Image (cartoon, rainbow, N blue to C red):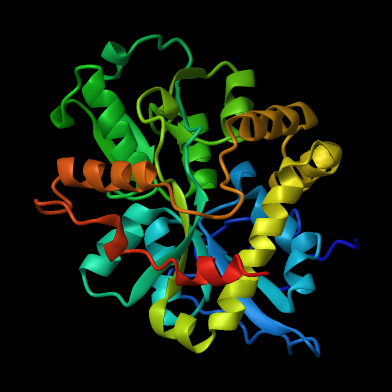
Amino acid sequence: MPRQSCRRCLVLLPLLMIAGCASPAAAPSASPAATAQPPAAATPGLEPLTGAQVSVAGNYLPYYAADKLGFFTRHGLQFELLIADSPTKVVQAIASGSADIAWNAPDSSILAIEQGAPLTMVGATQNSIPYSLIVQPGIRSFAELKGKTFAVSSLNSGPAILMRKMFAANGLGEGDYDFVPVGGTAERFAAIRSGTVTGGLLLQPEDLRLMSEGFVRLALATDYVPRYQWLTLLTRREWAREHSDRVVRAIRALQDAIRWAYDPQHRAEAIALIEESTRAPHEHAVATYDLYTQLRIWPEDLAFEDAAMRAVIELMGELGQLPQPLPEPAKYIDTTYLARAAQR
Protein backbone atom coordinates (compact mmCIF):
# COMPACT_ATOMS: atom_id res chain seq x y z
CA MET A 1 0.00 0.00 0.00
CA PRO A 2 1.64 3.28 -1.03
CA ARG A 3 2.34 5.84 1.63
CA GLN A 4 0.77 9.27 1.47
CA SER A 5 2.09 12.34 3.20
CA CYS A 6 -0.29 14.57 5.08
CA ARG A 7 -1.42 17.33 2.77
CA ARG A 8 -1.68 20.31 5.09
CA CYS A 9 -0.34 21.21 8.50
CA LEU A 10 -1.64 24.15 10.49
CA VAL A 11 1.00 25.61 12.80
CA LEU A 12 -0.40 27.09 16.00
CA LEU A 13 2.89 27.74 17.80
CA PRO A 14 5.99 29.59 16.56
CA LEU A 15 8.78 27.30 15.47
CA LEU A 16 6.78 24.12 16.01
CA MET A 17 8.09 21.55 13.54
CA ILE A 18 5.69 18.95 12.25
CA ALA A 19 7.51 15.72 11.63
CA GLY A 20 6.41 13.92 8.52
CA CYS A 21 4.88 17.11 7.07
CA ALA A 22 7.48 19.81 7.63
CA SER A 23 10.97 19.93 6.26
CA PRO A 24 13.92 19.91 8.69
CA ALA A 25 13.96 23.69 8.51
CA ALA A 26 12.04 25.60 11.17
CA ALA A 27 8.36 26.07 10.46
CA PRO A 28 7.22 29.64 9.83
CA SER A 29 6.10 31.62 12.85
CA ALA A 30 2.39 32.00 13.44
CA SER A 31 0.22 33.42 16.18
CA PRO A 32 -2.18 31.23 18.15
CA ALA A 33 -5.00 32.76 16.15
CA ALA A 34 -3.41 31.80 12.84
CA THR A 35 -5.65 30.22 10.25
CA ALA A 36 -4.75 27.67 7.63
CA GLN A 37 -4.49 28.28 3.94
CA PRO A 38 -7.45 26.97 1.95
CA PRO A 39 -7.08 23.20 1.59
CA ALA A 40 -6.28 21.62 -1.70
CA ALA A 41 -9.22 20.49 -3.78
CA ALA A 42 -10.51 17.10 -2.74
CA THR A 43 -9.46 14.14 -4.84
CA PRO A 44 -12.41 12.92 -6.92
CA GLY A 45 -14.27 10.22 -5.05
CA LEU A 46 -12.83 11.23 -1.66
CA GLU A 47 -14.44 13.40 1.00
CA PRO A 48 -12.29 15.80 3.04
CA LEU A 49 -11.54 15.09 6.69
CA THR A 50 -9.36 17.34 8.84
CA GLY A 51 -7.91 15.79 11.99
CA ALA A 52 -6.13 17.44 14.91
CA GLN A 53 -3.73 16.38 17.65
CA VAL A 54 -1.57 18.16 20.21
CA SER A 55 1.91 17.18 19.04
CA VAL A 56 4.03 14.59 17.29
CA ALA A 57 4.58 11.51 19.48
CA GLY A 58 4.72 7.74 19.18
CA ASN A 59 1.32 7.17 20.80
CA TYR A 60 -0.33 8.65 17.69
CA LEU A 61 0.92 5.72 15.59
CA PRO A 62 -2.57 4.61 14.46
CA TYR A 63 -3.35 8.17 13.30
CA TYR A 64 -0.15 8.22 11.23
CA ALA A 65 -0.84 4.75 9.87
CA ALA A 66 -4.41 5.61 8.90
CA ASP A 67 -3.10 8.61 6.97
CA LYS A 68 0.17 7.45 5.45
CA LEU A 69 -0.73 3.84 4.76
CA GLY A 70 -4.02 4.70 3.10
CA PHE A 71 -6.64 3.46 5.59
CA PHE A 72 -8.47 6.78 5.39
CA THR A 73 -8.32 6.62 1.61
CA ARG A 74 -9.74 3.09 1.60
CA HIS A 75 -12.75 4.45 3.41
CA GLY A 76 -13.23 7.31 0.97
CA LEU A 77 -11.58 10.07 3.01
CA GLN A 78 -8.94 12.62 2.07
CA PHE A 79 -7.19 13.32 5.34
CA GLU A 80 -5.35 16.45 6.43
CA LEU A 81 -3.57 16.85 9.76
CA LEU A 82 -3.54 19.87 12.05
CA ILE A 83 -0.98 20.08 14.88
CA ALA A 84 -1.77 22.32 17.85
CA ASP A 85 0.35 22.95 20.92
CA SER A 86 -2.17 22.19 23.69
CA PRO A 87 -5.36 20.21 24.30
CA THR A 88 -7.21 23.51 24.74
CA LYS A 89 -6.25 24.64 21.25
CA VAL A 90 -7.28 21.29 19.82
CA VAL A 91 -10.71 21.81 21.41
CA GLN A 92 -10.84 25.31 19.94
CA ALA A 93 -10.00 23.93 16.50
CA ILE A 94 -12.92 21.50 16.69
CA ALA A 95 -15.34 24.05 18.13
CA SER A 96 -14.45 26.61 15.45
CA GLY A 97 -14.66 24.14 12.57
CA SER A 98 -10.95 24.33 11.72
CA ALA A 99 -10.84 20.56 12.28
CA ASP A 100 -13.48 17.84 12.05
CA ILE A 101 -12.13 15.20 14.43
CA ALA A 102 -9.41 15.26 17.07
CA TRP A 103 -7.36 12.70 18.92
CA ASN A 104 -7.47 14.61 22.20
CA ALA A 105 -7.34 14.39 26.00
CA PRO A 106 -10.89 14.08 27.41
CA ASP A 107 -10.42 16.38 30.41
CA SER A 108 -10.07 19.47 28.21
CA SER A 109 -13.05 18.31 26.16
CA ILE A 110 -15.15 17.80 29.31
CA LEU A 111 -14.33 21.30 30.56
CA ALA A 112 -15.36 22.76 27.20
CA ILE A 113 -18.62 20.78 27.18
CA GLU A 114 -19.38 21.95 30.72
CA GLN A 115 -18.92 25.52 29.49
CA GLY A 116 -21.44 24.99 26.71
CA ALA A 117 -19.28 23.94 23.77
CA PRO A 118 -21.36 21.74 21.41
CA LEU A 119 -18.83 18.89 21.38
CA THR A 120 -18.96 15.16 21.95
CA MET A 121 -16.55 12.24 22.15
CA VAL A 122 -17.37 9.46 19.68
CA GLY A 123 -14.59 6.96 20.32
CA ALA A 124 -11.82 5.99 22.74
CA THR A 125 -8.36 6.06 21.21
CA GLN A 126 -6.11 5.40 24.21
CA ASN A 127 -7.17 3.81 27.51
CA SER A 128 -3.92 4.08 29.48
CA ILE A 129 -1.05 6.51 29.75
CA PRO A 130 2.57 5.33 29.62
CA TYR A 131 3.77 8.80 30.65
CA SER A 132 7.18 9.08 32.29
CA LEU A 133 7.91 11.70 34.92
CA ILE A 134 11.30 12.88 33.67
CA VAL A 135 13.44 15.03 35.97
CA GLN A 136 16.89 16.55 35.91
CA PRO A 137 19.96 14.32 36.32
CA GLY A 138 20.82 13.54 39.94
CA ILE A 139 17.27 13.68 41.32
CA ARG A 140 16.29 10.39 42.92
CA SER A 141 13.18 11.07 45.05
CA PHE A 142 9.94 13.04 45.12
CA ALA A 143 11.16 14.83 48.24
CA GLU A 144 13.77 16.57 46.08
CA LEU A 145 11.00 18.09 43.93
CA LYS A 146 9.75 20.45 46.63
CA GLY A 147 9.95 24.08 45.54
CA LYS A 148 10.65 23.15 41.91
CA THR A 149 8.89 24.10 38.67
CA PHE A 150 7.45 21.65 36.15
CA ALA A 151 6.34 21.94 32.54
CA VAL A 152 2.75 21.16 31.52
CA SER A 153 0.84 21.72 28.30
CA SER A 154 -1.76 23.79 30.18
CA LEU A 155 -2.71 24.17 33.83
CA ASN A 156 -5.85 22.05 33.44
CA SER A 157 -4.42 19.52 31.02
CA GLY A 158 -4.15 15.78 31.54
CA PRO A 159 -0.42 15.93 32.37
CA ALA A 160 -1.07 18.57 35.01
CA ILE A 161 -3.86 16.52 36.61
CA LEU A 162 -1.75 13.39 36.64
CA MET A 163 1.29 15.11 38.08
CA ARG A 164 -0.81 16.54 40.92
CA LYS A 165 -2.04 13.01 41.62
CA MET A 166 1.50 11.59 41.57
CA PHE A 167 2.87 14.39 43.76
CA ALA A 168 0.05 14.08 46.29
CA ALA A 169 0.66 10.34 46.60
CA ASN A 170 4.24 11.17 47.55
CA GLY A 171 3.44 13.81 50.15
CA LEU A 172 3.67 16.98 48.07
CA GLY A 173 0.85 19.52 48.34
CA GLU A 174 -0.05 21.96 45.58
CA GLY A 175 1.87 24.73 47.34
CA ASP A 176 5.07 22.67 47.24
CA TYR A 177 5.68 23.05 43.50
CA ASP A 178 4.81 25.23 40.52
CA PHE A 179 3.51 24.41 37.05
CA VAL A 180 4.32 26.48 33.98
CA PRO A 181 2.28 25.96 30.78
CA VAL A 182 4.69 25.63 27.87
CA GLY A 183 2.74 23.64 25.27
CA GLY A 184 2.79 20.13 23.86
CA THR A 185 5.33 17.34 23.87
CA ALA A 186 7.99 19.17 21.87
CA GLU A 187 7.81 22.21 24.12
CA ARG A 188 7.91 20.20 27.36
CA PHE A 189 10.85 18.21 26.02
CA ALA A 190 12.74 21.42 25.21
CA ALA A 191 11.97 23.02 28.57
CA ILE A 192 13.22 19.99 30.50
CA ARG A 193 16.29 19.50 28.36
CA SER A 194 17.33 23.15 28.64
CA GLY A 195 16.96 23.13 32.42
CA THR A 196 14.25 25.80 32.33
CA VAL A 197 12.12 23.46 34.45
CA THR A 198 12.95 20.59 36.79
CA GLY A 199 10.84 18.09 34.92
CA GLY A 200 7.55 17.07 33.37
CA LEU A 201 5.60 14.21 31.87
CA LEU A 202 6.77 12.89 28.51
CA LEU A 203 5.68 10.08 26.26
CA GLN A 204 7.89 7.82 24.24
CA PRO A 205 10.26 8.33 22.51
CA GLU A 206 10.99 11.74 24.06
CA ASP A 207 11.44 10.26 27.54
CA LEU A 208 13.87 7.67 26.14
CA ARG A 209 15.89 10.39 24.43
CA LEU A 210 16.36 12.31 27.67
CA MET A 211 17.08 9.18 29.68
CA SER A 212 19.88 8.34 27.24
CA GLU A 213 21.33 11.76 28.08
CA GLY A 214 21.30 11.16 31.85
CA PHE A 215 17.87 12.50 32.78
CA VAL A 216 15.94 10.40 35.29
CA ARG A 217 12.60 8.61 34.96
CA LEU A 218 11.29 9.10 38.49
CA ALA A 219 8.00 7.27 37.94
CA LEU A 220 5.45 6.07 35.40
CA ALA A 221 1.93 7.47 35.44
CA THR A 222 0.54 3.94 35.13
CA ASP A 223 2.01 3.22 38.60
CA TYR A 224 -0.56 5.64 40.03
CA VAL A 225 -3.46 5.51 37.57
CA PRO A 226 -3.48 2.11 35.81
CA ARG A 227 -6.61 2.72 33.72
CA TYR A 228 -7.22 6.24 32.50
CA GLN A 229 -8.99 7.48 29.39
CA TRP A 230 -6.09 9.39 28.01
CA LEU A 231 -7.26 10.14 24.48
CA THR A 232 -10.61 10.14 22.73
CA LEU A 233 -11.99 10.98 19.31
CA LEU A 234 -13.58 14.40 19.65
CA THR A 235 -15.93 16.10 17.21
CA ARG A 236 -18.60 18.77 16.98
CA ARG A 237 -22.13 17.47 17.50
CA GLU A 238 -23.76 19.33 14.63
CA TRP A 239 -20.97 18.51 12.19
CA ALA A 240 -21.14 14.84 13.19
CA ARG A 241 -24.91 14.74 12.66
CA GLU A 242 -24.57 16.35 9.24
CA HIS A 243 -21.64 14.10 8.25
CA SER A 244 -22.49 10.96 10.19
CA ASP A 245 -21.33 8.65 7.41
CA ARG A 246 -17.97 10.41 7.36
CA VAL A 247 -17.60 9.97 11.12
CA VAL A 248 -18.39 6.26 10.83
CA ARG A 249 -15.84 5.81 8.05
CA ALA A 250 -13.20 7.68 10.05
CA ILE A 251 -13.81 5.35 12.99
CA ARG A 252 -13.51 2.31 10.74
CA ALA A 253 -10.26 3.61 9.23
CA LEU A 254 -8.78 4.09 12.71
CA GLN A 255 -9.97 0.66 13.82
CA ASP A 256 -8.23 -0.84 10.79
CA ALA A 257 -5.06 1.14 11.56
CA ILE A 258 -5.01 -0.04 15.19
CA ARG A 259 -5.41 -3.67 14.16
CA TRP A 260 -2.62 -3.18 11.63
CA ALA A 261 -0.38 -1.71 14.35
CA TYR A 262 -0.94 -4.67 16.67
CA ASP A 263 -0.22 -7.29 13.99
CA PRO A 264 3.27 -8.74 14.64
CA GLN A 265 3.75 -9.07 10.88
CA HIS A 266 3.78 -5.26 10.65
CA ARG A 267 6.17 -4.65 13.55
CA ALA A 268 9.11 -3.54 11.39
CA GLU A 269 6.96 -1.19 9.30
CA ALA A 270 5.25 0.24 12.39
CA ILE A 271 8.62 0.93 14.00
CA ALA A 272 9.78 2.61 10.80
CA LEU A 273 6.65 4.78 10.83
CA ILE A 274 7.35 5.87 14.41
CA GLU A 275 10.92 6.73 13.38
CA GLU A 276 9.71 8.69 10.37
CA SER A 277 6.97 10.57 12.21
CA THR A 278 8.84 11.39 15.44
CA ARG A 279 12.43 11.37 14.13
CA ALA A 280 13.34 9.04 16.97
CA PRO A 281 16.48 6.88 16.91
CA HIS A 282 15.74 3.32 15.86
CA GLU A 283 16.28 1.82 19.32
CA HIS A 284 13.84 4.32 20.85
CA ALA A 285 11.22 3.58 18.21
CA VAL A 286 11.61 -0.14 18.92
CA ALA A 287 11.18 0.38 22.68
CA THR A 288 8.15 2.63 22.08
CA TYR A 289 6.38 0.17 19.80
CA ASP A 290 7.08 -2.81 22.04
CA LEU A 291 5.82 -1.00 25.16
CA TYR A 292 2.60 0.18 23.50
CA THR A 293 1.74 -3.15 21.98
CA GLN A 294 2.52 -4.94 25.23
CA LEU A 295 0.21 -2.58 27.15
CA ARG A 296 -2.28 -2.55 24.26
CA ILE A 297 -2.92 1.12 24.86
CA TRP A 298 -5.20 1.52 21.81
CA PRO A 299 -8.63 -0.18 22.06
CA GLU A 300 -9.09 -2.04 18.78
CA ASP A 301 -12.76 -1.16 18.43
CA LEU A 302 -12.39 2.37 19.91
CA ALA A 303 -14.88 1.38 22.63
CA PHE A 304 -14.96 3.46 25.78
CA GLU A 305 -13.83 1.75 28.97
CA ASP A 306 -16.10 2.79 31.82
CA ALA A 307 -13.39 2.58 34.49
CA ALA A 308 -11.01 4.66 32.36
CA MET A 309 -13.59 7.41 31.75
CA ARG A 310 -14.60 7.47 35.42
CA ALA A 311 -10.94 7.83 36.42
CA VAL A 312 -10.80 11.07 34.40
CA ILE A 313 -14.01 12.42 35.93
CA GLU A 314 -12.97 11.45 39.47
CA LEU A 315 -9.61 13.19 39.13
CA MET A 316 -11.32 16.31 37.80
CA GLY A 317 -13.70 16.16 40.77
CA GLU A 318 -10.80 15.91 43.21
CA LEU A 319 -9.29 19.02 41.64
CA GLY A 320 -12.54 20.96 41.89
CA GLN A 321 -13.00 21.09 38.12
CA LEU A 322 -16.32 19.22 38.28
CA PRO A 323 -19.03 19.64 40.93
CA GLN A 324 -20.42 16.90 43.16
CA PRO A 325 -22.24 14.69 42.49
CA LEU A 326 -19.95 13.84 39.64
CA PRO A 327 -21.57 13.50 36.21
CA GLU A 328 -21.85 10.19 34.40
CA PRO A 329 -19.51 9.55 31.45
CA ALA A 330 -22.57 9.32 29.17
CA LYS A 331 -22.95 13.10 29.44
CA TYR A 332 -19.86 13.58 27.30
CA ILE A 333 -19.90 10.68 24.84
CA ASP A 334 -22.02 9.49 21.93
CA THR A 335 -21.64 5.81 21.09
CA THR A 336 -24.08 5.74 18.17
CA TYR A 337 -21.28 6.16 15.62
CA LEU A 338 -19.34 3.25 17.13
CA ALA A 339 -22.46 1.10 16.89
CA ARG A 340 -22.85 1.97 13.22
CA ALA A 341 -19.16 1.39 12.56
CA ALA A 342 -19.51 -2.12 13.98
CA GLN A 343 -22.12 -2.96 11.33
CA ARG A 344 -19.62 -3.54 8.55
Would residue 114 be found to the left or right of residue 102 on screen? left
Would residue 151 be found to the left or right of residue 23 on screen? left
Based on the displayed image, in which of its 4 quarters is residue 111 positioned? bottom left
Q: Nearer the viewer, residue 106 or 148?
A: 106
Quarter of the rendering occupied by the C terminus: bottom right
Q: Nearer the viewer, residue 10 or 248?
A: 248
Q: Nearer the viewer, residue 308 or 98?
A: 308
Q: Residue at x 52, y 61 (%)?
A: 14
- Residue 208's spot in the image, x, y percent? 62, 26
Query: Number of callouts in the render?
Result: 0
Q: Is residue 20 visible to the viewer in this orientation of the structure?
A: no
Q: Nearer the viewer, residue 97 or 153?
A: 97
* Direction left: furthest residue: 324
* Direction front: furthest residue: 343
* Depicted 177 relative to depicted 82: above or below: above
Q: Residue at x 46, y 71 (%)?
A: 336
Q: Is residue 157 visible to the viewer in this orientation of the structure?
A: yes
Based on the displayed image, in which of its 4 quarters is residue 206 positioned? top right
Quarter of the rendering occupied by the N terminus: bottom right
Q: Residue at x 79, y 31 (%)?
A: 282
- Residue 88's spot in the image, x, y percent? 37, 61
Would residue 205 be found to the left or right of residue 316 on screen? right
* Depicted 119 relative to depicted 159: above or below: below
* Direction right: furthest residue: 2
Q: Residue at x 14, y 30 (%)?
A: 175
- Residue 52's spot in the image, x, y percent? 54, 65
- Residue 277's spot in the image, x, y percent? 72, 49
